[in-house]
Amino acid sequence: MRLPYDKLFENNKAWASRQTEKDPHYFSDLAKSQSPEYLFIGCSDSRAPASVITGTRPGEIFEHRNIANLVISTDMNLMAVLQYAVDVLKVKHIVVCGHYGCGGVKAALGKKHNGLIDNWLRSIRDVYRQYRHTLDPLAEEKVAHVS
């Protein structure tokens, strides 16, 4: 019986075979070390993978993703990634990358309760509440340009 995730394993095996056909030392070279120039903090959205949208190869970009690409000082996972990237990997550039139509941002600004994710998105709601008078005219201006 074929399981839904079998396709992922097959694709991975095929990709690994292609890589070693092109370069027999591909994986052993990658395993030695990494020295990316960039830390990419992006959204978990499956339509915006960092290596695809930046045209980078494995080892060129260190990546952290979360819903709505939030950078929050209380997120110990992000703080550990940031510290490791700067202190150990010596990255030179940090990119925080959002995208149009982010479902996390939409959820944060909506009135619907979404369960556990509401806790994660609270910082967006707080910023919006604090700067609503500045942000609302920008949204209206965007709508006026589109119309």
Image (cartoon, helix red, strand yellow):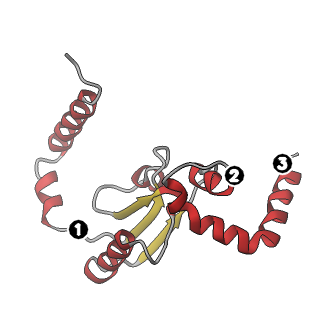
Q: Secondary structure at mark 3?
A: helix
Residue under numbered circle 1:
34
Rate crowding at label 3 as few (under 14), some (14 to 19) or many (20 or more) other CA atoms within 10 Å.
few
- Mark drawn on residue 65: none
Residue drawn 66% across and 71% down? 127
The image position of residue 11, as x and y in percent, is 26, 33
Residue drawn 22% across and 30% down? 10
Residue drawn 10% across and 56% down? 28
Q: Residue furthest bottom?
A: 87
Mark 2 and 3 residues: CB-CB less than 8 Å, in contact?
A: no
The image position of residue 39, as x and y in percent, is 39, 69
Q: Secondary structure at mark 1?
A: loop
Q: Amino acid at mark 3?
A: Val
Q: Residue furthest top?
A: 1
Residue under numbered circle 3:
146
Residue under numbered circle 2:
111
Residue drawn 11% across and 52% down? 25
Q: Amino acid at mark 1?
A: Gln
Q: Secondary structure at mark 2?
A: loop
The image position of residue 17, as x and y in percent, is 16, 37
Q: Earlier in the sequence, mark 3 or mark 1?
A: 1
- Report the Cα–Cα distance between label 2 and label 3: 25 Å
